[in-house]
Image (tube, rainbow, N blue to C red):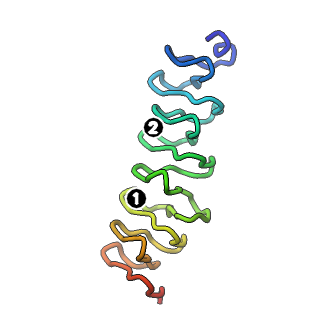
Amino acid sequence: CTEAKRCSKHCITGVSSSKRCITGVSCSKCCITGVVCSQRCITGVSSSQRCITGVSSSQCCISRVSRSQRCITGVSSSQRCIMGVSSCQRCITGVSSSKCCIAGVSSSQRCIAIVSSSKRCIAGVSCSKRCIAGVSSS
């Protein structure tokens, strides 16, 4: 790991030389090939996944997310967690990770837990109320 030491990065025992441990990251966390020093590495994520700056190790990094995106605990890899960015599935800023992000729900709408994908959540409707499919926001 002399190459890594020259780069001011630390190597973890048993990790191949193609993987780098980033300065300040504990040795229990795995560093992924090609991640920059400002990014955090999370144990058990594949090389196709990227760790986003400021995301804790308890949160999952989803494949192909950009730095501007945030990962939410418990959200499956089929869902994109995006703050204020269009996608087939929206994770709304300020909505807790216990709430489901529904495909096609706009950023002005709220995501409510245990609401099926056939139902739409209407802006300003409390989480105790259910939104019915095909009902307009009015």
Residue identified by numbered label 2:
57
User: For the view shown, which residue lies furthest in the left direction?
Assistant: 128
Identify residue type, mark 1.
Answer: Ser
Please identify the quadrant where the N terminus is shown. Answer: top right
Residue identified by numbered label 1:
96
Q: Residues within 10 Å of mark 1 (few under 14, many from 20)?
A: some
Q: Does 37 appear above or below 63?
A: above
* Residue 126 located left or right of residue 91: left
Residue at (38%, 82%) from the top-left corner?
132
User: For the view shown, which residue lies furthest in the top direction?
Assistant: 2
Mark 2 secondary-structure assignment: loop
Badge count: 2
Residue at (36%, 58%) from the top-left corner?
98
Identify residue type, mark 2.
Answer: Ser
- Residue 121 image position (x, y, % from top left): 43, 76
Q: Does 54 appear above or below 37?
A: below
Q: Does 59 appear above or below 40?
A: below
| Alpha-carbon span between mark 1 and mark 2 | 17 Å
Residue at (52%, 47%) from the top-left corner?
62
Residue at (45%, 37%) from the top-left corner?
57
Q: Does 90 appear above or below 56?
A: below
